Amino acid sequence: MARYIGPKCSQCRYIGAKLMLKGAKCSSQRCPLERRSNVPPGGRSRMRRRISDRGLQLKEKQKVRFIYGVLEAQFRRFLAEAERLPGMTGDNMLILLERRLDNVVYRLGFGESRQQARQIVRHRHIRVNGRRVDVPSFLVKVGDEISWREQSAKTELYKVVAAQVQSRNVPVWLRLEEEQMRGVVVSLPTSEDMDSRLSGKAVVEYYSR
């Protein structure tokens, strides 16, 4: 399955909620969901009919996929890995997704959106423990230090990020050292740290059929 390259706002309209896929645009009046919240992609009026339990589970699965920006095959691999870990499979899956390097870069405020954070990682701007890592799906662990390459600190992108990073809310399982523009994983995320809009249980139920 190829990566989706269409309008990100169509994904929000399909779900019927803001997924914050476009950064600052999602919080502005330019967000299409503000003007077309009742019209799904394709221009058709939203039909007033009850969505089945299966349909709700599918929509929940797609919501998680869209937010973290992973393909179906990648998503299934995360689910398979979550099943091998002790505890609730749904919670384990969300925790694994939260530990992705592109998500951590976004959570630290180094990217305006997860998509931009993914590009930052792929363009080799980020180091983990002093080593360059350009794989967005790299899973961080406790004690890892996430920083910018010295050469990347000379770019205009870095200057913009450094000027705005103080306004970001960093989750408790991460520590941001603003002066050094460096983040540290102080603990692994827990189920309490997950987005309350997401239901890992519904995702597991979708795949269990």
Image (tube, rainbow, N blue to C red):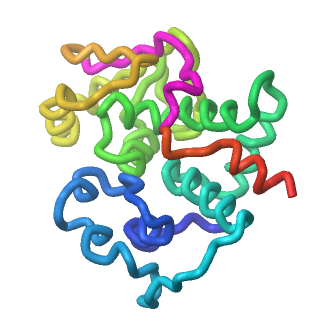
Asked if residue 89 lies left or right of residue 120, the reply is: right
Q: Residue at x 51, y 9 (%)?
A: 143
Question: Is 191 in the magenta?
Answer: yes
Give whichever of 129, 182 is nearer the camera: 182
**What x and y, as percent, mark residue 111?**
32, 40
Q: Which residues are magenta?
A: 181-195
Asked if residue 46 lies left or right of residue 57, the reply is: left
* Quadrant placement of the N terminus: bottom right
Give whichever of 118, 75 is nearer the camera: 75
Q: Is residue 181 above or below residue 207?
A: above
Asked if residue 36 lies left or right of residue 70, the reply is: left
Give the residue at the far bottom of this rendering: 44
Q: Residue at x 46, y 87 (%)?
A: 42
Q: Quadrant of residue 147?
A: top left
Asked if residue 187 lies left or right of residue 24, the reply is: right
Q: Is residue 140 above or below residue 1?
A: above
Q: Residue at x 47, y 10 (%)?
A: 186
Q: Residue at x 44, y 45 (%)?
A: 118
**What x and y, as percent, mark residue 112?**
29, 44
Q: Is residue 51 above or below residue 107?
A: below
**What x and y, as percent, mark residue 34?**
26, 68
Q: Quadrant of residue 37?
A: bottom left
